[in-house]
Each structure stands twice: as structure tokens, then as C-alpha cells.
Image (cartoon, helix red, strand yellow):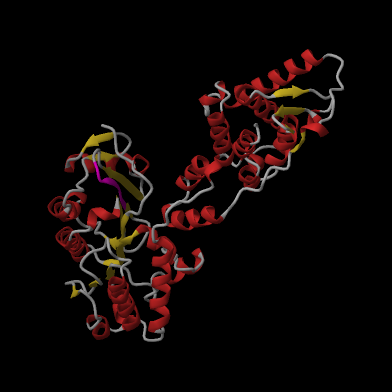
């Protein structure tokens, strides 16, 4: 069974639930968790897990859950994962800890994409599931919302350091999300009557004293003006010390950061920048697109007019050309398993190499001495070979590598100088990309 992962889908927002509650050690585990699994099976509308994973994967069944928890179990903690083999993607974790008093039950659910929860009835069934869980397992705090927006809000620590979070727990209403379950302690801190009178889509007191609060009928449109208004009103009601207009403005700012931005990348680097954007976290993606839309690669400086070219100063030009070819082969040897296109020495292979070096953060993840002595000469020689093979260029060999030139049209290019500038930093891999130099050389070939 192949589990579907978030990497199998395009980069987009997900729906997340986190629930911190308690369970009883006085009851057999299978009896204690039976209501939990019953609610999961009854209310998981279209996203029911079909795989359980402990030390090995099994088809979903309650017996498989008990076996997975047994496999992963230790004296004080056990956990298992639940997944799907079909769309939508599900990444669900169930953890049980006896290290705390009372013993802790921790649930994390991530469903991708968030748009799967655009229907009011599906959202209602999800709320009913959480209600059943929180009624059976006393909850400290639970939330369900857009994962991207949760990231922008700074959850789970809400801007606090780990020590403060561990000491104080969820000691006040730091944020109101689409679905919230506030435990009895927090309810008493805020005031039960105040919490029950919160303006929201649904407010319900649970049998154990917790309060369930849902701000809006559907979660997929959390960033709409109406949903944000409801979110701000609920938050301001629960935290009268906070300014409503400030809360609403902050929510609208987060919505703006998540609003889709049309990519308008520099045409020379559109393929490379699209891949760079795909590496950004989903909540940072739109901001990254906007930044790269505004960014323009600097015009390459590693060239001279053809009539200013340095003449060859080597005794054996053929030997120099062979040495450049050998150096280029060193890059092929370095990259061929991760970047198979380097065998082809095409413009596309330059883009693939650019992305590889950028994704690996090569200038800072490798020893500087090794970069300068080995990587830079290999990259420069490979760039020169691509200019020769694809643009009809001609090497003008020099004793010093940095003076070696490739004549293309009315310019000579300095590929080893470009390679040195290229390997200065991660940003310079974009500013001085191999792809950009090639495209500019291509335009000036005539």
C-alpha cells in the first residue's frame, strides 16, 4: 500500500487539527479509545484513513490500531500514524503519554487540500467528530483551521518561548481559530458566561465543562472578509483588553499574505524560479512569488567586447582544451546522480544545476576550500563547454583559469570568473546563475 503524501500534490494550503486532551489508565486501552475510533469512522466524510502505521503498515482496522500502538509503545509513551492511499492526503498522528498527570492524549490531523472542506455539511461532520472526542477526553485546548494561517499566527507557541509555553500552557486566549475547544481551566479564567455569549456560528458547552466554539460555517473560506470579521469579533469578545480594529487589521494582513499572486518571473529564469517557489513553505509561497516577481537578475559582468579579448598565452592550446573538458567532466561526476541532465551539456542542464546548488545551499553547506579548489573550476569549465557546444563558442585558452574566455559572437565570456561569483552565497546562485549568463550570451550571439 503506497501512502499518499503531501508531496504528491501541488503546493497548497492544508486543514489542520491539534487536540491536547486526557485519557484514563483505569480503563483498558481498547475500551478507552473505542469511542475515539467510533467517532472517526462515523464522521470522517471522505477522508477516512485506510492505512495504520506502527513499525509496519497495515490496512486500517481497529485491531491494526491496537497493534501499531503496541509496536510503538514504551513504558511512558506510544503513538501511531494513520494515512490514506487516495486523495485527499491525510497525515494523522495519535499519541498517548503517561508521563503527564492526567495521562495525555494528543491528536494531530492534517488533510490536504484545505479546499476539501469547502462544504458546510462536511465541516459540520468534522465539528461533530471533535465534539465527540472532546466530550470523552477532557481537553486542555484544541483547534482546527487553515495550516497556512496557523503558521502566520505563530501557533503553537503564539510568540512565546518554549519555557514559557511549558510553564503557562494555554493560559489565555491568544488566538481564535475556525474551530476551538477551550478546556475548563481556560473557561473559568475567561468566565463561563462570557465565553458562552461569544458571537460565533456555534458555541456549545460540553458535559465535562469544556466549551466548543466555531466561528464560521466553513473553514475553506476562512480568509474571506465575512469570516475574518466573525473571527475578530469572537477574539475581541473573549479578550476585551484587545482592540477589535487592531485584531481585524491583523487578520486582513494575514489574508493578504495568503492571497494568490500570479507569477511574472524574468523570462530567462522562469523555470528556475518556479522551482525555487515550489520549495517555499505553503504559507510563504505567495510572498515568495511577489518577491521574485519584483527581483531582476543583475546583468552579467563576466564578459569583454570581442575586440578586447586577451590572446592565448599557452604553449599547447589543444592540451588546455582537453583540461577544460576534463574539469567539466568533474562536475558531471559530482552531479550526475542528482542531476542526470548534466550528461547532455544543454541550457536546461544549467538550470537543473542552478536549482541543485540552490536547494543544497551549496556555498554554505560545503567547505569553502573544497568549493574554491574543486567546485569553481569544474562549474566554470562546464559552463564554458555548454557555450561552446550550444552557441558555437570557441575557447581562448589562458594560463590562468580566470582569464580563460569563450568567444560567442561579438563578446568573450569569462566562465571561471562567473563560477567564482556564483559560488559566493546562496543568493549569488540566483544573482549570478549559469542560466542567466547563457541566455544573455545567446541574445548577443548575432
Regarding residue 423, the answer to whether it shows in the image is no
Regarding residue 215, the answer to whether it shows in the image is yes
Tell me if 164 is positioned left or right of 104 in this view.
right
Location of residue 444 (image quadrant) = top right
Residue 312 percent location from the top left of the image: 84, 22
Residue 428 percent location from the top left of the image: 65, 45
Location of residue 158 (image quadrant) = bottom left
Residue 185 lies in the magenta-colored region: no
Q: The C terminus lies in which quarter of the figure?
A: top right
Tell me if 305 is positioned left or right of 444 in this view.
right
State the count of labels: 0
Q: The N terminus lies in which quarter of the figure?
A: top left
Residue 93 lies in the magenta-colored region: yes
- Image: 41 above or below 437: below
Residue at the image position 45 percent from the left and 67 percent from the top: 165
Which residues make up the magenta segment? 87-95
> Which of the two residues, 442 or 153, is positioned nearer the viewer here?
442
- Image: 165 above or below 378: below
> What predominant SS class does the magenta segment belong to?
strand
Residue 25 percent location from the top left of the image: 25, 56
- Image: 141 above or below 37: below
Tell me if 408 is positioned left or right of 233 in this view.
right
Residue 61 percent location from the top left of the image: 17, 41
Residue situated furthest front in the rendering: 446
Location of residue 169 (image quadrant) = bottom left
> Which of the two residues, 27 or 292, is positioned nearer the viewer here?
292
Residue at the image position 24 percent from the left and 43 percent from the top: 87
> Which of the two residues, 40 or 335, is positioned nearer the viewer here?
335
Amino acid at each position: 500500500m503506497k501512502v499518499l503524501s503531501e508531496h504528491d500534490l501541488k503546493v497548497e494550503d492544508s486543514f489542520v487539527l491539534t487536540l491536547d486532551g486526557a485519557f484514563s489508565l483505569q480503563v483498558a486501552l481498547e475500551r478507552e479509545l473505542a469511542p475515539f475510533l467510533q467517532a472517526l469512522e462515523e464522521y470522517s466524510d471522505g477522508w477516512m484513513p485506510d492505512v495504520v502505521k506502527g513499525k509496519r503498515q497495515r490496512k486500517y482496522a481497529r485491531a491494526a490500531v491496537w497493534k501499531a500502538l503496541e509496536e510503538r509503545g514504551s513504558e511512558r509513551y506510544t503513538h501511531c500514524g494513520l494515512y490514506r492511499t487516495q486523495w485527499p492526503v491525510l497525515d494523522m498522528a495519535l499519541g498517548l503519554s503517561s508521563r503527564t498527570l492526567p495521562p495525555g492524549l494528543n491528536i494531530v490531523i492534517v488533510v490536504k487540500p484545505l479546499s476539501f472542506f469547502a462544504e458546510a455539511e462536511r465541516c459540520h461532520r468534522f465539528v461533530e467528530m471533535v465534539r465527540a472526542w472532546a466530550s470523552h477526553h477532557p481537553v486542555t485546548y484544541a483547534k482546527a483551521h487553515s495550516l497556512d494561517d496557523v503558521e502566520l499566527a505563530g501557533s503553537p507557541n503564539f510568540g512565546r518561548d518554549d519555557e514559557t509555553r511549558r510553564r503557562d500552557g494555554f493560559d489565555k486566549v491568544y488566538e481564535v481559530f475556525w474551530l476551538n475547544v477551550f478546556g475548563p481551566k481556560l473557561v473559568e479564567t475567561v468566565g463561563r458566561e462570557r465565553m458562552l455569549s461569544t458571537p460565533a456560528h456555534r458555541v456549545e458547552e460540553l458535559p465535562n465543562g469544556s466549551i466548543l466554539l466555531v466561528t464560521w460555517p466553513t473553514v475553506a473560506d476562512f480568509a474571506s472578509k465575512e469570516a475574518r470579521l466573525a473571527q475578530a469579533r469572537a477574539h475581541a469578545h473573549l479578550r476585551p483588553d484587545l482592540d477589535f480594529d487592531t485584531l481585524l487589521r491583523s487578520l486582513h494582513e494575514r489574508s493578504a499574505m495568503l492571497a494568490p499572486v500570479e507569477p511574472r518571473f524574468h523570462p530567462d529564469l522562469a523555470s528556475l524560479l518556479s522551482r525555487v517557489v515550489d520549495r517555499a513553505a505553503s504559507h510563504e509561497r505567495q510572498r515568495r512569488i511577489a518577491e521574485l516577481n519584483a527581483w531582476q537578475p543583475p546583468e552579467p559582468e563576466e564578459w569583454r567586447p570581442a575586440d578586447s579579448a586577451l590572446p592565448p598565452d599557452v604553449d599547447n592550446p589543444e592540451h588546455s582544451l582537453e583540461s577544460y573538458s576534463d574539469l567539466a567532466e568533474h562536475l558531471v561526476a559530482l552531479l550526475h546522480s542528482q542531476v542526470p541532465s548534466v550528461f547532455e551539456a544543454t541550457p536546461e542542464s544549467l538550470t537543473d544545476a542552478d536549482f541543485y546548488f540552490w536547494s543544497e545551499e551549496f556555498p554554505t553547506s560545503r567547505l569553502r576550500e573544497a568549493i574554491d579548489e574543486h567546485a569553481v573550476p569544474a562549474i566554470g569549465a562546464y559552463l564554458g563547454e555548454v557555450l561552446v557546444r550550444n552557441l558555437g563558442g570557441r575557447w581562448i585558452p589562458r594560463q590562468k583559469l580566470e582569464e580563460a574566455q569563450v568567444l560567442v559572437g561579438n563578446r568573450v565570456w569569462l566562465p571561471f570568473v562567473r563560477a567564482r561569483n556564483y559560488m559566493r552565497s546562496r543568493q549569488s546562485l540566483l544573482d549570478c546563475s549559469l542560466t542567466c549568463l547563457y541566455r544573455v550570451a545567446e541574445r548577443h550571439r548575432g
